[in-house]
Amino acid sequence: MKTRITELLGIQYPIIQGGMAWVADHHLAAAVSEAGGFGILGAANAPAEVVREEIRQVREMTDKPFGVNIMLLSPHAAEVAQMAAEEKVSAVTTGAGSPEKYLKLWQDAGVRVIPVVASVALARRMERCHVDAVVAEGMESGGHIGSQTTMTLVPQVVDAVQIPVIAAGGIADGRGFAAARMLGAEGVQMGTVFAASREAAVHENYKQRILKAKDIDSEVTGMSLGHPIRSLRNRMTREYLRMEKEGATFEELESMTVGTLRKAVVEGDVMDGTVMAGQIAGMIKEEKSCRDIIEGIMRQAEELMGRAV
C-alpha cells in the first residue's frame, strides 16, 4: 500500500510502532522495520549516549528506516534531540509538548518530524511549523492520553490539516487499520500489540498480563490532576484511584508511581507496577512475531477494503 506516509518514511507498509518507554528498544524497533513497518526507539528519560547506543544496535540488525520517540518533558530531551540530528535518524516522533525549538535542528539534518497530537489546535500549530506529518492519538491508547477518542479525533484532524495524518489509539488488527484509512488517516501507529510481540524484550509477566487482559481491564488514573494515564488494573491502580477519589495531593499520588513502569516492564511486578496498555489489550490473545502481526493486519485490511493493498 502506497500512501504519503510510506513515501515519506521509505517503508513498505504504513504501520508505525509506538515509542513506548522501557518497551521500544532496539530489538523491537529493528523487528518492526525489518517486517516492512517503521520501528521506533523510545528515548523516554534516557541520556543521549544510551539512546545513541540503541540506534547503533538497530543499525546492526537492519538497514531499514527507523526513528526515535523523544518525550519532550524528559530532562535529557535537548541532548537527545541534538544526538538524533547527529545520527541522522529517519524520523523523530515527539510527545508531552511542542517540538518547535528543535525543528530547525532536525530539518537541517534531514530528519522527518512527526509530533503526536491530541487536538485539532495542536495539529494546526504543528502544520504551521512545517512538520512532516502528525500522529492523531485517541484516548484509547495506553500511557499518557488526551480527551478525545480516535474515531472523533482523526477525521477532525484530517479535515483541519493538509499534511499526512497517522491514526493511533485502539488499533490492533486489519479492522482497525481499515477503519483508520476510512477516516482519512494515511497510516496507523500501534503500541500495545507490539508490546506483546515475540520480539518485545519485556518481562514475561508484563507480556502475559496483556495477553490475558479482558475488555474491562483498562483503567485511567490521574484524570483529576490533568495527567491521565491508561494502564491495566492492578493493586497499584486500585490504591491510586482510591487516594485520588479521597483528594490526595499531586505529590502524594506522584510518589506512588515513580519508577513503577520500569518495575512492571523490567522487573515483572504487574501488581504494584504500571502496566501501560491500550484498551485493545483484550483483543490480543496470542504472542506473534512483528512480521506476522504486520502481514496479518495487511491481509485482513485487504479483504475488508475490497481491493489490493
Image (spheres, helix red, strand yellow):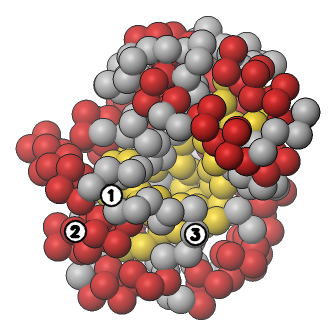
Could you tell me how far apart the alpha carbons at marks 2 and 3 are, in whole angstroms? 19 Å
The tag earlier along the polypeptide, 2 or 3, is 2
Visible in this render: residue 1?
no
209 w.r.t. 161: above or below? above
Q: Quadrant of residue 69?
A: bottom left
Does 42 sit left or right of 309 as displayed?
A: left
Q: Which structural element holds mark 3? A: loop
The tag on residue 83 is 2
Residue shown at 43% from the left, 30% from the top: 262
Could you tell me how far apart the alpha carbons at marks 1 and 2 are, in whole angstroms? 12 Å
- Disc 2 packing (10 Å; few <14; some 14–19; many ≥20): some
Visible in this render: residue 215?
yes
Q: Which structural element holds mark 2? A: helix
Q: Amino acid at mark 2?
A: Met
281 w.r.t. 21: above or below? above
Q: Amino acid at mark 3?
A: Gly
